[in-house]
Image (spheres, grey):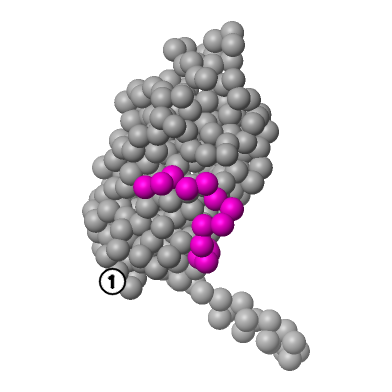
C-alpha cells in the first residue's frame, strides 16, 4: 500500500509528458538550436515524420581552415586583420560594412573587421576586437540552416557537451524543412501566418575581453524589435560561438520596446 503522499508523487511522474522532445511545446517555441536565421522564422517546422533523423542530405563535416596549425602570431595561415583598436568598444558600425545574402537573410561583413577570408562554406578570419566579435555573432549562427552546418559547427563552434547536444538536436531537422529559412526566408512569426521580413537592425557588446565576448543582436520584425545574445570565445586564432549547456547558440529571443542601448546598422 502507498501512502497518500507516495500516491501523489507516482501520479505526478506518470503525468509528465512522455512524447518525444520535438513534439513538446517548449522545444518548438524556443527552436534556438537552429541559430538566428531559423529563430527569425519562428517555430521550426520539422519533417513530416516529426523527428525523423537526418536523412544524410547534409554534407558531412570537412576539414576547414581552422582545423590546421596556427602560425607563430596565433592566427591561421593567411589570416590578417586590423586589430589596432584592441579592446576598445565600438561607438558606431564599421565604415566599410557591406551586406551579403546568407541562409535566407542578409548579414554584415567588413573588410577591416571580417570575415576577410572564405574557404568552402566557412566565412572566417575576424578581427580580434569587439567589432570582430560582433561580425562573428551575426555570421556564424546564420550558417546553421544550410546543408554545410556540420562543417560550420566543427570549425566555428566551441567543442564540448553543448556542441554535441546542438549537433544531436540539429540532426533531427532536415535542411530543406518547409517553413525553414532556406524555404521561405526570414519571417517574424511562422505560427501567426505573418509574412513581414525580419532583419538584423543593430547590436551591443555587453561584455568583452580578448578571450571572450557577449554580443547582443537587435532584430527588426514586422511586430517591432527583439533581442538575443550570442556568446563567443577566441580559440584557434579566430572567434567561435560558445553554445550553452542545453545546445543553444544564442539566448531566447525577447521583445524590446525600442532600439535604446544598441548601435544601429542603418539599413
Residue 120, located in which quarter of the rendered image?
top left
Residue 226, given in percent of the width and then of the height, sits at: 48, 60
Position of residue 60 measured from the top left corner of the image (x, y, whole percent): 34, 33
Image quarter in which the N terminus is found = bottom right
- Is residue 116 visible in the rendered image? The answer is yes
Answer left or right for 67 relative to 54: right
Comparing 97 with 37, the one in front is: 97
> Front-most of 251 and 133?
133
Q: Is residue 100 left or right of residue 166?
A: left
Query: In the rendering, at what x and y percent does residue 54 appear?
Result: 33, 48
Res. 4 image quadrant: bottom right
- For disc 1, the marked residue is 193
Nearer to the camera, 168 or 34: 34
Foreground: 148 or 2? 148
Q: Residue at x 44, y 59 (%)?
A: 31
Residue displayed at 55% across by 50% down? 262
Query: Which residue is pictured at 52% across the width and 31% down the height?
Result: 132
User: Secondary structure under badge 1?
Assistant: loop
Residue 254 in magenta stretch = yes
- Looking at the image, residue 40 sits to the left or right of residue 253; the answer is left
Judge the density around disc 1: few (<14), some (14-19), many (≥20) Cα neighbours within 10 Å. Answer: few
For the magenta stretch, what is the residue range?
Answer: 253-267
- The residue under the point 59% across, 8% down is 72
How would you classify the magenta stretch by its main secondary structure?
loop
The mark tally for this picture is 1
Q: Does the stretch in magenta take in 102?
A: no
Q: Is residue 12 above or below residue 220?
A: below
Query: Does the image show residue 165?
Result: no
Give above or below for 174 relative to 235: below
Q: Pinpoint residue 9: horizontal percent, then vertical percent.
A: 68, 81
The residue at the far top in this view is 72
Amino acid at each position: 500500500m502507498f501512502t497518500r503522499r507516495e500516491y501523489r508523487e507516482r501520479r505526478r511522474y506518470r503525468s509528465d509528458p512522455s512524447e518525444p522532445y520535438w513534439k513538446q511545446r517548449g522545444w518548438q517555441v524556443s527552436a534556438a538550436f537552429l541559430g538566428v536565421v531559423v529563430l527569425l522564422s519562428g517555430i521550426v517546422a520539422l519533417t513530416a515524420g516529426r523527428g525523423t533523423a537526418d536523412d544524410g542530405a547534409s554534407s558531412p563535416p570537412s576539414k576547414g581552415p581552422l582545423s590546421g596549425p596556427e602560425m607563430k602570431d596565433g592566427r591561421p595561415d593567411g589570416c590578417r586583420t586590423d586589430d589596432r583598436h584592441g579592446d576598445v568598444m565600438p561607438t558606431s558600425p564599421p565604415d566599410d560594412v557591406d551586406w551579403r545574402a546568407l541562409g535566407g537573410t542578409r548579414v554584415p561583413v567588413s573588410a577591416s573587421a571580417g570575415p576577410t577570408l572564405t574557404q568552402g562554406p566557412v566565412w572566417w578570419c575576424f578581427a580580434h576586437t569587439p567589432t570582430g566579435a560582433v561580425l562573428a555573432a551575426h555570421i556564424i549562427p546564420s550558417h546553421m540552416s544550410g546543408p554545410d552546418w556540420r562543417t560550420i559547427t566543427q570549425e566555428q563552434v566551441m567543442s564540448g557537451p553543448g556542441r554535441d547536444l546542438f549537433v544531436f538536436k540539429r540532426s533531427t531537422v532536415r535542411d530543406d524543412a518547409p517553413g525553414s529559412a532556406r524555404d521561405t526566408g526570414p519571417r517574424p512569426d511562422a505560427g501567426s501566418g505573418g509574412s513581414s521580413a525580419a532583419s538584423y537592425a543593430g547590436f551591443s557588446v555587453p561584455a568583452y575581453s580578448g578571450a571572450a565576448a557577449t554580443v547582443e543582436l537587435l532584430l527588426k520584425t514586422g511586430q517591432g524589435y527583439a533581442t538575443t545574445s550570442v556568446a563567443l570565445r577566441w580559440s584557434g586564432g579566430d572567434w567561435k560561438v560558445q553554445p550553452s549547456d542545453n545546445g543553444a547558440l544564442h539566448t531566447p529571443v525577447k521583445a524590446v520596446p525600442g532600439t535604446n542601448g544598441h548601435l544601429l546598422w542603418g539599413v
